Image (tube, rainbow, N blue to C red):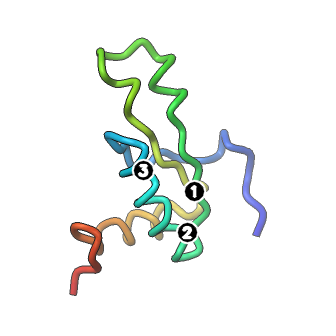
């Protein structure tokens, strides 16, 4: 499946560290949701001090509902039952 350029992707999660973002990325990719991690947006945005460490998780616009559903069903790295 081909997706629009990165401009057509949507931020769905903001992680405090790259490690947290990588965990979310891995979970989404395991469910066949393509992911891009973006730390430049916050680093160059002139936001509050410390914001440069945040990493934004983005997915293609058409997969936002699936990605959000996946994030809502996972609690503390373990699928909620």
Helix, strand or loop status at disc 3: helix
Residue 14: where, in percent of width, then height? Answer: 37, 43
Residue 34: where, in percent of width, then height? Answer: 61, 62
Write down the residue under mark 2: 29
Rendered residue at 35%/65% (across/down): 71
Rendered residue at 38%/49% (across/down): 13
Q: Which mark is residue 4?
A: none
Q: Tell me, yes or no, whether the two marked residues, 1 and 2, touch with CB atoms within 8 Å.
A: yes
Q: Residues within 10 Å of mark 1 (few under 14, many from 20)?
A: many
Rendered residue at 39%/63% (across/down): 68
Q: Tell me, yes or no, whether the two marked residues, 3 and 1, touch with CB atoms within 8 Å.
A: no
The mark that comes first in sequence, 3 or 1, is 3
The vertical placement of 30 against 58, above or below, is below
Q: Which mark is residue 35?
A: 1
Write down the residue under mark 3: 21
Residue in the foreground of this view, choosing between 32 and 10: 32
């Amino acid at each position: 499946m081909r997706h629009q350029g990165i401009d057509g992707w949507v931020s769905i999660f903001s992680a405090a560290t790259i490690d947290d973002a990588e965990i979310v990325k891995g979970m989404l990719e395991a469910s066949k949701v393509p992911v891009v991690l973006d730390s430049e947006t916050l680093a160059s945005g002139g936001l509050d001090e410390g914001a440069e460490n945040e990493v934004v998780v983005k997915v293609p616009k058409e997969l936002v509902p699936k990605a959000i559903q996946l994030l809502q069903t996972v609690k503390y790295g373990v699928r909620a039952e």
